[in-house]
Amino acid sequence: MFTVNKALLWAKNYLKKCGLENTALEAEVLLAFCIKLDRVALYRQNERFLSPEEEENFRRMIKRRGQREPVAYLTGHKEFMSLDFLVNPAVLIPRPETELLVEKALEIINAKVFKVGQTQKDKILIVDVGTGSGAIAVSIAKHIKNLSGVYIYATEISPAALDVARLNAKRHGVAGNITFWPGDLLEPLKNQGCEGQISLITANLPYIPTLEIDRLEPDVRLYEPRLALDGGKDGLDFYRRLISQGGEFLRPDGYLLMEIDPAVINQISWLLIAAGWKFNVFFDLAGKERLIAAVQEV
Ligand SMILES: C[S@@+](CC[C@H](N)C(=O)[O-])C[C@H]1O[C@@H](n2cnc3c(N)ncnc32)[C@H](O)[C@@H]1O
């Protein structure tokens, strides 16, 4: 029978043999999940015996991880912006670099760049395009200084992903602040009185060139939804369309915030310049061009 210590040792060795790197952390996260303890408690209870069901469940999970199934899909949870998000294989697992986009969005909104007044025209309307798990939209709603007068819309092409986003909004108590729209990019908002009204569009859309998907880590290419990864031949299919659609929906002082693949910074820059946008580029913690904040030239 496994004690906590022995289970961790076995799991670390097993995962190492499978070629994985963060074996200690992953073994701890999965064991804590299987025996319903937090990770710190594992150290306090390191001689605790696992029940036969717990041991069987843990062995099964470690074997699935050995086949590269992501830890977040195994546990069904991923932390993003200090919030616990539900995830399943219908949604991209939120990435730490996307927190940069949320922080910039909050900076723009919290700085009261936009006036909130009594009229429809002065309300703050934010749209998260391709919301996936809802990580961006929900985090903005949770962390914004003042939600009154702020309306958040989130669009998504995958109905299964929208279900997850709705659950996350409910889980974090912001379901009443976010309206979810099934459909393609900004199309669902056409004829909804949104044209020229949006203060901020956030977008982390699929941006991997189709032929590069097969070269991605197995954790990503075998398990994460292709719909969330495939950005077409050069990875820019969605950004090309969003850049041309966005101007029609944004207020003249509205921002388009886009997470990008650093490899396409030049191509994206030319697309924006050609469509008449001014923009700033922001770098992620690895020093790579990861975020663009664009406004329309007046
Ligand atoms: C890279 S994932 C990002 C998900 C989420 N925004 C995040 O940052 O974690 C891109 C998302 O866009 C969605 N998507 C793909 N094509 C779309 C389209 N034409 N219109 C709206 N959403 C789309 C995918 O289903 C996926 O959920």
Image: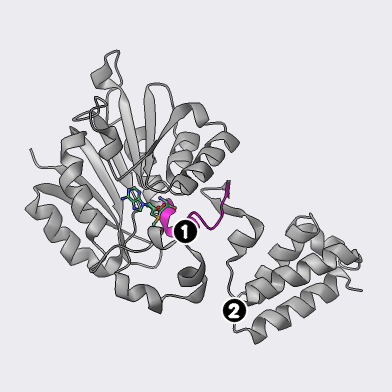
Q: Is residue 191 above or below residue 202?
A: above
Q: Which residue is mark 2?
A: 21
Which residue appears at 45% of the width and 45% of the height? 159
Q: Nearer the viewer, residue 120 or 216?
A: 216
Which residue appears at 59% of the width and 84% of the height? 19
Q: Is residue 13 above or below residue 168?
A: below
Which residue appears at 89% of the width and 66% of the height? 52
Dot 1: element: loop
Q: CA distance from mark 1 to mark 2?
A: 18 Å
Crowd tier of the residue under label 2, counting other residues whose Cα lies within 10 Å: few below 14, some 14–19, many 20 or above: few
Dot 2: element: loop
Q: Quadrant of residue 185?
A: top left
Q: Amino acid at mark 2?
A: Glu
Q: Is residue 211 above or below residue 114?
A: below
Indicate left or right for 173 with 236 as reference. right
Give the residues drawn in magenta, as a range.
85-99
Whether residue 50 can be seen here = no
